[in-house]
Image (cartoon, coloured by chain):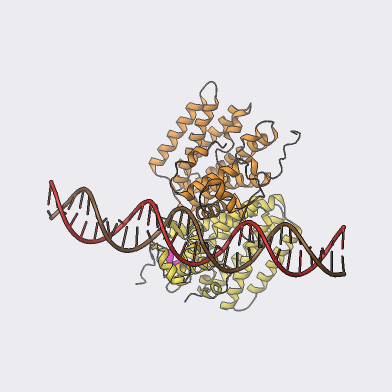
Chain colours: A orange, B yellow, C red, D brown
DNA sequence: GTTGAAGTTTATGTATACAACCTACCACGG
DNA sequence: CCGTGGTAGGTTGTATACATAAACTTCAAC
């Protein structure tokens, strides 16, 4: 079934299990956008009682996968291509804000050291003569760590919380389109640009150049815009887009 | 007790009642920051069963009033003065983003007309020779409407949702410090500046000047910074700050 | 044939009972 | 006297039963 199904087995609480399982059900496309979710049908599908399922539904609504129906219950949300575009742009805005206040207020030396270590790992990756799919998986890790470090550099719980929420939607994640990118011929080129962004932002933060750091992070997020466009319009890559099943109109012109 | 207690009486669902009541309990200071919330104590206080109360607790966690305790249950969050500063700056960033995309993508004529009507109401208010407390209440309405119109001008559900969440904290609201402002000698001056911001942003959006619109909304939010500083440091106005009880260190030097 | 209304069915909202866990206190041993 | 173990109390997590409201179906009348 779903690639993440395993992790739901050995979880602690029933609520968390339900949350993960439901998310998988949604992202795998078994539950389609617009569908109303009946609690009872989930009960018999997951084999637990209604209470943890109701809890999970509330949480998934907060995460943005579901929307409350006025008369009660929840339905699976559908997203337009523009919604995804906006979510990416929003992430760029928030990460730009993080970079700016990190630069303006200054960051702890230890965080800066971690950032530079992360850059070295990235450099080593790009230096490899050929890039395998495993290399891209490794990049996902390094990239996610860089963005996490940026948030800790901003040292603002309020902002961290808000960014966390903005990243709940899978296609808004910093690494959302990396595996798509891996399939594209210009993979290395995009990677090189992303690498440069990371370097420049780190340098800007160190040099207390807030405006520059902000602009760079915004532009960095826009790499995902291009990957999104390519992925949705290139044959065969659409399934690699995280949460592709949530996109309202398949758009992909000429595939069928 | 609380000024909003009335609205909790005639509510529909028990969950919503619990949510509103709990929020009042927190904002009125009856439940103090750091306190762990026992579900049973709320049960006997509100006279309903645990189920809707648990639901309300989850929602209030999402709103930012509570934080989950690792071992289970919730505790009331405490905020530093810098958290509030960041929340205001964050609102400015998000509203700036809204203003920018409204300007860049263009807005429907009807929304623009509503904005201009709102500006006229604002102008009429400022033109009054003296400003009563009622006038400031009216301003809160007009101001809230302006900010709501800005969001609808951006026409982005993803962004609207995110801003809505950012405004859950009472001190992050656009009108959060207006009643404080009313008590200050420079009340009219601040109002005049806010009025100019509203005018300029609307004109910038109409003229498709995205960068200008964004910068203006950011600066507009920073008016709240000043009001925050004044309110916390001026004797007697501290209680007018919404959610003042959530602020960690009373800060207010020399009051006691 | 279509529309409206009433009854039935099924959904969610709420209450409560039960189980598992964490915590704090007390006793016992080193 | 300090540390460790166990037990008791209370807390949250889960399951289930019940009430209420929404939706669907069916039947009848126009």
- The percent coordinates of residue A212 (x first, y second) are 54, 43
Front residue (pair B16, A232): B16
Residue at screen point 52% across, 34% down:
A140
Front residue (pair B157, B69): B69
Count of marks overlaid on the render: 0
- Please say whether residue B243 is one of the residues in the magenta stretch: yes
Front residue (pair A256, B135): A256
Front residue (pair A98, B48): B48
- Res B111 seen here: yes
Magenta-highlighted residues: B242-251
- The percent coordinates of residue B211 (x first, y second) are 64, 50
Rendered image quadrant of residue C10: bottom right
- The percent coordinates of residue A245 (x first, y second) are 64, 41
Quadrant holding the N terminus of chain A:
top right
Residue at screen point 68% across, 67% down:
B118
Residue at screen point 44% across, 37% down:
A115
Quadrant holding the C terminus of chain A:
top right
- Please say whether residue B234 is one of the residues in the magenta stretch: no
User: Is residue B185 rendered to the left or right of residue B107?
Assistant: left
- The percent coordinates of residue B140 (x first, y second) are 59, 70
Rendered image quadrant of residue A196: top right
- Main secondary structure along the magenta-highlighted residues: loop
Q: Is residue A143 above or below residue B14?
A: above
Q: Is residue A121 above or below residue B109?
A: above
- Res B131 seen here: no
Rendered image quadrant of residue A228: top right
């Amino acid at each position: 079934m779903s690639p993440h199904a395993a992790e739901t087995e050995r979880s602690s609480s029933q609520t968390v299990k339900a949350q993960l399982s439901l998310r998988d059900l949604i992202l795998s496309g078994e539950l389609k956008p617009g569908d109303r979710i009946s609690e009872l049908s989930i009960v018999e599908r997951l084999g637990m009682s209604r209470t943890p399922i109701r809890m999970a539904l509330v949480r998934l609504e907060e995460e943005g996968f579901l929307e409350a129906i006025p008369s009660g219950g929840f339905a699976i949300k559908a997203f337009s291509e523009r919604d995804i575009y906006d979510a990416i742009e929003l992430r760029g805005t928030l990460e730009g804000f993080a970079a700016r206040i990190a630069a303006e207020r200054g960051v702890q030396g230890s965080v800066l050291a971690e950032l530079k270590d992360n850059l070295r790992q990235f450099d080593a990756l790009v230096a490899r003569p050929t890039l395998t799919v495993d290399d891209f998986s490794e990049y996902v890790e390094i990239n996610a760590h860089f963005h996490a470090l940026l948030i800790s550099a901003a040292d603002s719980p309020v902002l961290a919380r808000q960014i966390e929420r903005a990243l709940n939607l899978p296609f808004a994640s910093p690494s959302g389109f990396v595996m798509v990118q891996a399939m594209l011929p210009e993979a290395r080129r995009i990677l090189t640009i992303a690498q440069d962004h990371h370097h420049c932002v780190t340098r800007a933060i160190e040099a207390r150049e807030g405006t520059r750091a902000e602009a760079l992070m915004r532009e960095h997020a826009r790499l995902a815009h291009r990957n999104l466009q390519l992925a949705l319009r290139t044959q065969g890559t659409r399934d690699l887009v995280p949460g592709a099943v949530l996109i309202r109109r398949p758009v992909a012109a000429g595939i069928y």
